[in-house]
Amino acid sequence: MIPAHHATHAFSLRLAILLISIILAACAGPQPPPYEEGSISVHFCPQDCNSTLHALARTAETLDCAFYDLDPDAFPRIPTAKILIFEDNYQDTGTPIGSRSLMHNKFCILSERLTWTGSMNPTYNGIFRNNNNLILINSSCITRNYRAEYLELQDGHERALPCPTVNLSGTLIHTYFCPEDDCHGALLTALQEATRSIHFMTFSFTLNEAADLLITKHREGLNITGIFEKRQQSHSIHQKLADAGITLYWDKNPATMHHKTFIIDEKTVITGSMNPTKNGVGRNDENLLIINDERIARAFLSELHTIPREPLTPTAHTR
């Protein structure tokens, strides 16, 4: 039998080792995100999404997709494709998926390393008429994230995100899935960190907290500009921003300006399927990427400048 004082000493020693381990771990600070070699590119509709889509479909090893909407005639016919489609838009193609609000994703897993996402629904309008973006990412980490979300949508069992952040050949990419991840907080934090400029293109924008941050940044002297889809004007936050003196525009695309994008300091891009709305951040099934890459930011800025627009003026009492 071990004497009581020996047992007490052994327990105290184990406790001391545990406390030292905790202190050392705390002092070490957060670990850097995983690094892998890979690439990211962006394509814009209606300019080149159709050719990009068909080229991807021809070379895809798999085609596991989650779409809010789909025109079967506009999407390449791949017998092995496994498509999850929001139940309200089901047209006998794929598997209908319910949601407490909208299953609003637009992504496809093409191989163990290749994923596309963005704002584009593979419909005739989404590909050929609307202003949209299609992000193509060559990364096993990002693909594992989207694979976990695909399976979660498929069977309803929530899964942890394998790689919330990845360093992809020097580009930091943060992945969020709404509503389970804090998409709202991620958006606000990224906007708060802006020091020079914020430019945005939004199909629908109703988040007061994000609007208030843009107004604060404008008053601090940052360059803030934005383009809104004109058909959403009755539900938008545009007037609040215009009355604060922010330079804004209506899009003049006779179809739809469908981007959901913020460009921060000409080096960080927030994009994906999520509109900055209460449903977008808190109810819908969505995906959101925050990409720290000047090349991708320049591409989105170029897209912003090519969209036909007209000035959005403040109300009379603020002029």
Image: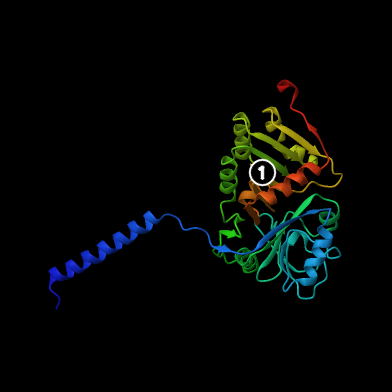
| Residue 138 placement (x, y as % from top left) | 67, 64
Q: Nearer the viewer, residue 297 or 180?
A: 297
Q: Which residue bears the numbered disc 1?
A: 266
| Residue 127 placement (x, y as % from top left) | 83, 56
* Residue 201 in view here: yes
- In this picture, is 147 found above or below 233? below
**Is 193 displayed left or right of 234 in the figure?**
left
Give amino acid for label 1. Answer: Glu
Which quarter of the rendering shows the N terminus? bottom left
Is the residue marked by circle 1 packed among few (<14), some (14-19), or many (20+) residues within 10 Å? many
Find residue 107 and report its image quarter: bottom right
| Residue 309 placement (x, y as % from top left) | 82, 38
Find residue 200 and report its image quarter: top right
Mark 1: which secondary structure?
loop
Q: How many marks?
A: 1
**Which residue is located at x 83 percent, y 65 percent?**
72
- In this picture, is 127 found above or below 186? below
* Residue 203 in view here: no
Q: Nearer the viewer, residue 29 or 310?
A: 29
